[in-house]
């Protein structure tokens, strides 16, 4: 299981990218920092990927694993 540990607005910097779908965050777009139950970071995710994760129970970007 995972949880949202923090949210923040993107600054639009080049390295701010969703770990699920890989899209570049736009300046001001909300990003969610997700961590697993053991405290390990899962990464930053966009709202669409968070919704997908909640619906499927599978972390976005791992469907082919």
Image (cartoon, helix red, strand yellow):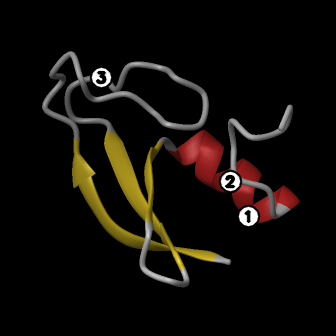
The residue lying at 72 percent from left, 56 percent from top is 53
- Tell whether label 2 touches label 1 (CB within 8 Å): yes
* Mark 1 crowd level (few <14, some 14–19, many ≥20, 10 Å Cα): few
The residue lying at 62 percent from left, 41 percent from top is 48
Asked which quadrant contains residue 11, the reply is top left
The correct choice, above or below, for 15 with respect to 41 in the image is above
Residue 19 left/right relative to 31: right
Quadrant (top left, top right, bottom left, bottom right) of the N terminus: bottom right
Mark number displayed over residue 64: none
Mark 2, residue position: 51
x and y, in percent, of residue 12 in the image? 18, 23
Mark 1, residue position: 54
Q: Earlier in the sequence, mark 3 or mark 1?
A: 3
Measure how far apart labels 3 and 2 are at the Cα level.
18 Å
Task: Report helix, strand or loop for mark 2.
Answer: helix
The residue lying at 53 percent from left, 46 percent from top is 47
* Extreme-bottom residue of the structure: 38
Residue 14 left/right relative to 19: left
The residue lying at 86 percent from left, 32 percent from top is 64
Task: Report helix, strand or loop for mark 3.
Answer: loop
């Amino acid at each position: 299981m995972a949880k949202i540990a923090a949210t923040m607005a993107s600054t639009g910097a080049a390295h701010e990218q969703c770990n699920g779908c890989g899209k570049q965050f736009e300046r001001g777009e909300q990003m969610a920092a997700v961590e697993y139950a053991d405290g390990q970071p899962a990464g930053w995710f966009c709202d669409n990927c968070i919704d997908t994760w909640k619906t499927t129970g599978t972390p976005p970007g791992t469907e082919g694993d």
